[in-house]
Image: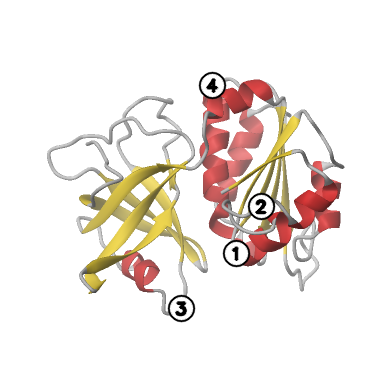
Amino acid sequence: MQLSPEAFQPVVVRGVTRVTPSSFIISITPSQGFSAFAPLPVAFSISIADKSMSLDGAFEQRPYTPLIPNSVQPGMPTPYLDILVKQYVGGQVSGFLAARQPGDTVLVRGPFIKLQDPEGMLKRFPRIGMVAGGTGIAPMLQVLRYAAATGYTGRITLLYGSLNRDEIALKDRLDALVLEFEGRMTVHYAVDGDPDGQHSGPVGLMSEAMIRECLGEGPQSDMIVLVCGPPPMMKAVGGGGRKEPLGGFLKDIGYEHVHKY
């Protein structure tokens, strides 16, 4: 099945699985008559629409970053896609997706490229830094999966922020990648609060000091920093979204190469 960024197409829900108190994975498969999605790029997003409600004839839609199964090599067809969704109180699309049952259909369009030339990036930079918050871990997992599949031999450091320990999403996948990279990947799990004092990683809101401690001082010409997270984090860490100039902690630290999702 060939997805298109121009038009919504129906796909079938494989299942919905809760991964944290406020987030879940909805797994989708191609529509009837297709066994797989056509090969998809690295670091892409799709839009999912709530077909039950519309505004002025247009579907309510949200962008999400799918996760490709570990068994699928780059450039190969994909039998299903897992999509990590943050569920908001009163959120129309997230609520619609959370209520889907196996066999239901949803509308998707894409892919939309979020990182140009990932192969060139891995060849150019022997070190990759990542700063992610919440469901912003999804595009990082796309890149990590691609780096592992293509034999990247550089070093990767990920600083991943969550509200608390229960809200750390997809830790099992990240820990499996740490093992796969055989000592070349480090993950720092940061939490906003730790009332019981049981967390072993950084505690507190994402800060300049936390980034310096985990990723190192700037400038570093041999490292690129990828960043993705909710708008307040993106503003503080990188000066805003990808269309806005670099600012925030990353600019203050002096990193030379930054990619914002």
Determine whether the residue tagged by mark 2 lies in a helix, strand or loop.
Answer: loop
| Mark 1 or mark 2: whose residue is earlier in sequence | 1
- Marks 3 and 4 in Cβ contact (< 8 Å): no
- Does residue 161 appear anywhere in the picture? yes
Image spot of residue 233 (x, y percent): 66, 62
Disc ID at residue 89: 3
Determine whether the residue tagged by mark 4 lies in a helix, strand or loop.
Answer: loop
- What amino acid is at disc 4? Thr
* Quarter of the view holding residue 134: bottom right
| Mark 4 crowd level (few <14, some 14–19, many ≥20, 10 Å Cα) | few
In the rendered image, which residue does mark 4 sit on? 150
C-alpha distance separating marks 1 and 2: 14 Å
In the rendered image, which residue does mark 2 sit on? 245
Determine whether the residue tagged by mark 3 lies in a helix, strand or loop.
Answer: loop
| Mark 3 or mark 4: whose residue is earlier in sequence | 3
Disc ID at residue 231: 1
Furthest residue toward left: 33
Q: Nearer the viewer, mark 3 or mark 2?
A: 2
- What amino acid is at disc 1? Pro
For the point 42% across and 38% down, the residue is 68
